Image (cartoon, helix red, strand yellow):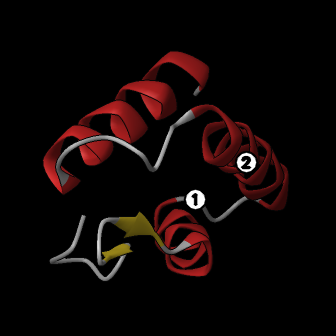
Amino acid sequence: MEERGMMKDGKTITDQVILNNQEKWIAPNHQALGKQVIDTCEKEVSPEKSTKCDIAVDYVMCLVKRG
């Protein structure tokens, strides 16, 4: 996630995640659904994990589960 600019200092950067989502999905309804998933995962994934890798894995797993 860091390489794509979606994480810095062990925290996700929501705006970058949304931009990444917009690159993947052209249809506005898909982008809206993607934003809902991103918002949900931002609330569910704890930034208190011990490493940025743990946070990234939990975040991606949430995206897969919800998306």
**Number of the label disc, if any, that sits on residue 61:** none
Q: Residue at x 37, y 26 (%)?
A: 61
Secondary structure state at the residue bearing disc 1: loop
**Residue type, numbered disc 2:** His
Label 1 close to label 2 by CB (< 8 Å): yes
Side of 4 relative to 15 (left or right): left
Residue toward you, 24 or 53: 53
Quadrant for the C terminus in the image: top right
Q: Hey, which quadrant is residue 52 in on the image?
A: bottom left
Q: Residue at x 29, y 77 (%)?
A: 9
**Residue type, numbered disc 1:** Trp
Side of 64 relative to 67 (left or right): left
Side of 18 relative to 27 (left or right): left
**Number of the label disc, if any, that sits on residue 25:** 1
According to the picture, the residue beneath numbered tag 2 turns out to be 30
Q: Is residue 20 above or below residue 15?
A: above
Q: Is residue 43 above or below residue 12?
A: above
Provide residue 33's location: percent of width, then percent of height.
78, 42
